[in-house]
Amino acid sequence: MLQQPLKAMVFDAYGTLFDVHSVVALCEQLWPGKGAALSQLWRAKQLEYTWQRSLMRRYEDFARVTEAALRYACAALGLRLDEDRRRRLIDAYLGLATFSEVGNALAELKSMKLKLAILSNGSPAMLRPVVANAGLRGLIGTVISVDRRKIYKPAPAVYRLALQRLRVPKKAIGFVSSNCWDACGAKSFGFPTFWINRTGAPVDELGAAPDHVIASLAELPALIRQPGS
Amino acid sequence: MLQQPLKAMVFDAYGTLFDVHSVVALCEQLWPGKGAALSQLWRAKQLEYTWQRSLMRRYEDFARVTEAALRYACAALGLRLDEDRRRRLIDAYLGLATFSEVGNALAELKSMKLKLAILSNGSPAMLRPVVANAGLRGLIGTVISVDRRKIYKPAPAVYRLALQRLRVPKKAIGFVSSNCWDACGAKSFGFPTFWINRTGAPVDELGAAPDHVIASLAELPALIRQPGS
């Protein structure tokens, strides 16, 4: 239940607004039969490195972490990563499409006078092209990268960035992510949270569960209009 | 190359000294055909939760994190976790055997006048019985849990605990782990490090690589005796 009317919605980027399916498909195209294993290990290491580097206090931006994770995953699976393949895979991150419902859902939320923002692990140089290429620049007013704080989600300092940039009270900022641990981190910080559970996964047991669990962004506008739901 | 003679050796516990094979076997016994998938997801979530909770500043001890990860893994795989199974799986952590080379290697290191210690994510209540049951109390003089700092590896505050407890200079403490990211965290803190690479995995790309990569603890005594190696 929403305790007060929301004034802003903050979205995670990769997997929430942007579908990484095209990267998975490119992995399979480059190494037939190995695409699923590669993209799974690549993603797992990408996230692990963000957490481990944050705890080690050895922040490196998300573009470099993403490349390091790709090199590790290819080495672990015995796949030869040459310069051409490396570039194609990294560039694929810059041209991701949004999930099909995203454009309409964001337009409807914007028509409800909500400020819309992205808060992402992505580096500014990764976020600018993907937002522009997907045609979201007219809908998303604010794009915030963790890079400003040199630490990754789910550190409270990251969620605080949204508060500082949007100048809206904490309880009036709805946070939306398809990563359950990210939604838990935002909830722990104090945002009303919406977990987009695209795969029917259980809720992560992190001591701070998301307020709302929905299957896609298409459910958001109606949910926000009816605070008693 | 070791820059100065080591005066103490600090070991990670799970996977480094203690073999978690018996837990994997019990998973398979309780859910035939699902044991590998369960123990893999359980372990992955156990580690994720330590990193995420550390970043969220929501520390909970390792016994509770381990149980939460087990509940998540069973829910995700559709396995019914009743009280009896839960207790058997958690209790299995208290009676783990050491890898076959551990007893001899530790005895030889001890005969070289090195102080031996454990530095583990495990809670004190988990570490006490497993060290005693494995007969290591006469070999390992100091058992240190991250619980004292309420944060998990690879945070520098954890490695600093070993420095404080052993009262030996940083460069005279050799740190040994089978988890590459743990060895990288210790290296980043400043310890000479030994990664036990039991599976032939690539080195993690975290900006601080282990000094030595060996296949088992059996290689340690000779390596330490010959600083030029």
Image: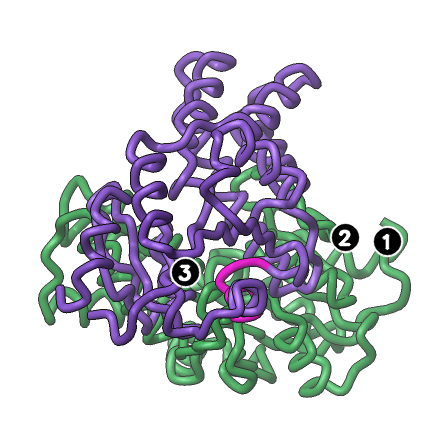
Chain colours: A purple, B green
Reading the image, the residue beneath label 1 is: B1
Question: Could you say where residue B224 lies in the image, as x and y percent from the top left?
Answer: 78, 60
Can residue B204 be seen at all in this image of the molecule? no
The residue located at (22%, 56%) in the rendering is A213
At label 1, the amino acid type is Met
Q: Nearer the viewer, mark 3 or mark 2?
A: 3
Q: CA distance from mark 3 to mark 2?
A: 49 Å
Asked whether the beta carbons under mark 2 and mark 1 sit within 8 Å of each other, the answer is yes
Q: Nearer the viewer, mark 2 or mark 1?
A: 2
Magenta residues (range): A152-159
Q: Which mark is residue A8?
A: 3
The residue located at (60%, 19%) in the rendering is A88
- Residue situated in front as seen by the camera: B138 or B171: B171
At label 2, the amino acid type is Asp
The answer to whether B109 is drawn above or below residue A123 in the figure is below
At label 3, the amino acid type is Ala
The residue located at (75%, 55%) in the rendering is B222
Asked whether the beta carbons under mark 3 and mark 1 sit within 8 Å of each other, the answer is no
Q: Residues within 10 Å of mark 3 (few under 14, many from 20)?
A: many
Query: Chain letter of disc 3?
Result: A
- Residue situated in front as seen by the camera: A166 or A198: A166
Q: Residues within 10 Å of mark 2 (few under 14, many from 20)?
A: some
Question: Could you say where residue A37 lies in the image, as x and y percent from the top left?
Answer: 41, 28
Evaluate whether label 2 is on the same chain as label 1: yes
Q: Which secondary structure lies at badge 1?
A: loop
